[in-house]
Image: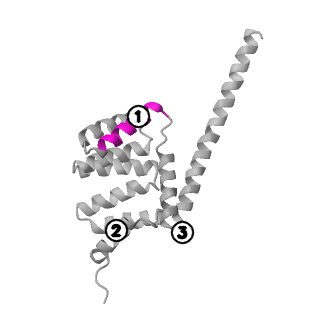
Amino acid sequence: MTRKDFKSAVAAFSTALLVSLPATAQTEATDVESLLRRLAQAESETAAERLERQVITEWSKSGSATMDLLLRRGQDALERGEFDLASEHFGALTDHAPDFAEGWLGLAQAYYGDERFGPAMDALERALAIEPRHFGALRGVGAIHEQVDRPALAYRAYERVLELRPHDAEVQQALERLEMQVRGIAL
């Protein structure tokens, strides 16, 4: 094989890879689409929980081992209640992968844990701009609105969560808790 043939083969291989990447990304998006549709129509809590885990698994794939490590470290810090450390990990993650919704969700959770509701809401808005059907981010929006005494906005966010995850018992309880404040007393 001549040097020219080798360069042509490499160019053809590289082009084939580039052409196949959007199809792979499209397949992943289709998988999430399918999972979200099935989740919205889940007939049991058990089926819904399984589908939720699958959706979260898909959303948690950054495509970078380094970003995945930052995500894991941030999540571990959250679990230990180390919100400042979690903020550092998620801050680095969102700096390097600004289009990764899970990074913004983690940052919001760290801020929320520190009762920094404004920055938490900003991070949730970034997550929802990337993935408008992110039920975790929508739950966070509802929780913050509820925390800062905006029951109507909390109620709307929670309603949207139930459209996506109809078997969310905590959100159903939140809606019941807020219903009188939002809808008033029926006569």
Question: In percent of the image, x 35 and y 37: which residue is there?
Answer: 73
Above-or-below relation of 30 to 45 = above
Residue beneath label 1, please?
69
Give the residue type at disc 3. Answer: Glu
Q: Amino acid at mark 2?
A: Tyr
Looking at the image, is mark 3 or mark 2 earlier in the sequence?
3
The earlier-in-sequence mark between 1 and 2 is 1
Asked if residue 76 is among those painted magenta in the image, a careful observer would answer: yes
Residues in magenta?
64-78
Q: Is residue 4 above or below residue 51?
A: above
Q: Label 1: how many residues lie within 10 Å, few (<14), some (14-19) or many (20+)?
A: some
For image coordinates 33% across by 74% down, the residue present is 176
Residue found farthest to the front? 46
In the picture, the quarter occupied by the C terminus is bottom left
Quarter holding residue 181: bottom left
Note whether 110 is above or below 137 in the view shown: above
**Comes first in the chain, label 1 or label 3:** 3
User: Secondary structure beneath disc 2?
Assistant: helix
Labels 3 and 2 touching (C-beta < 8 A): no
Q: Which mark is residue 43?
A: 3
Residue 94 is at least partly visible in this image: no
- How far apart, in angstroms, are the residues tagged by discs 1 and 3? 35 Å
